[in-house]
Image: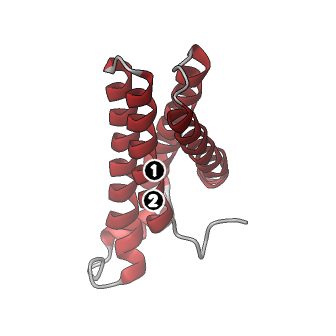
Amino acid sequence: MYTGFKHLHSFLPYLLMAALVITIIIFAIKMSKGSAYTAADKRLSLITLILAHLQFVFGLVLYFISPVSKAALTAETTMSDATNRLYAVEHPLTMLVAIVLITIGYSKAKRKEMSSAKFKTVAIFFAIALILALVRIPWNVWPA
């Protein structure tokens, strides 16, 4: 079970990062052109939201079953050891903030009336979430 969740949590980010980048680029282009916000645009942002939530759920399960997390959480030197701190606190908390930003961006855009405001809201919130995620991914152990 652990191996399956580890693989899911390691490879789903490729889809999520691609979806975030694609959404940000498409929405920035459409915003600059003054295009209308269509059902396809809503679907694209919803798919990105769903991928983010799935990634978070897999990560949350992995957080509680992973021997790496258990070791990091039970070590007396968790906060003074950079690796343990990354796995126990920094990565989960930063990713939670990124998921919350994605959710807020999607939700706020639904309430906007003008298409340009919808594109701008999603693009900004998704971009900030992408930057946060990229900063706290443990690149040294992430499979290429």
- Few, some or many residues within 10 Å of mark 2 (<14, 14–19, 20+): few
Q: Quadrant of residue 30?
A: top right
Against 20, residue 72 (above or below) is below
Q: Which mark is residue 131?
A: 2
Total tally of numbered discs in the picture: 2
Task: Determine contact: label 2, label 1, CB under 8 Å.
Answer: yes
CA gap, disc 2 to disc 1? 6 Å
Q: Residue drawn at (32%, 19%), measured in percent from left and top?
A: 111
Q: Is residue 1 visible?
A: no
Q: Residue at x 40, y 45 (%)?
A: 124
What colouring does the structure picture have? secondary structure
Q: Quadrant of residue 47?
A: top right
Q: Which quarter of the rendered picture does the C terminus lie within?
A: bottom right
Location of residue 100 (image quadrant): top left
The residue that appears at 43% across and 78% down in the rendered structure is 83
- Pick the residue in front: 36 or 10: 36
Residue 116 position within the rendered picture, expressed as x and y whole percent measured from the top left: 43, 29
Q: Image height check: is 16 above or below 3?
A: above
Q: Nearer the viewer, residue 16 or 125?
A: 125
Q: Read off the residue under disc 1.
A: 127
The spot of residue 69 in percent (x, y) is 43, 63
- Amino acid type at mark 1: Ala
Give the percent coordinates (x, y) of residue 141. 61, 72
Q: Residue at x 48, y 53 (%)?
A: 130
Residue 16 horizontal side relative to residue 128, left or right: right
Residue 49 sits above or below residue 80 on the image: above
Which label is found at residue 110?
A: none
Query: Which residue extends farthest right?
Result: 144
Which amino acid type is shown beneath numbered disc 2?
Ile
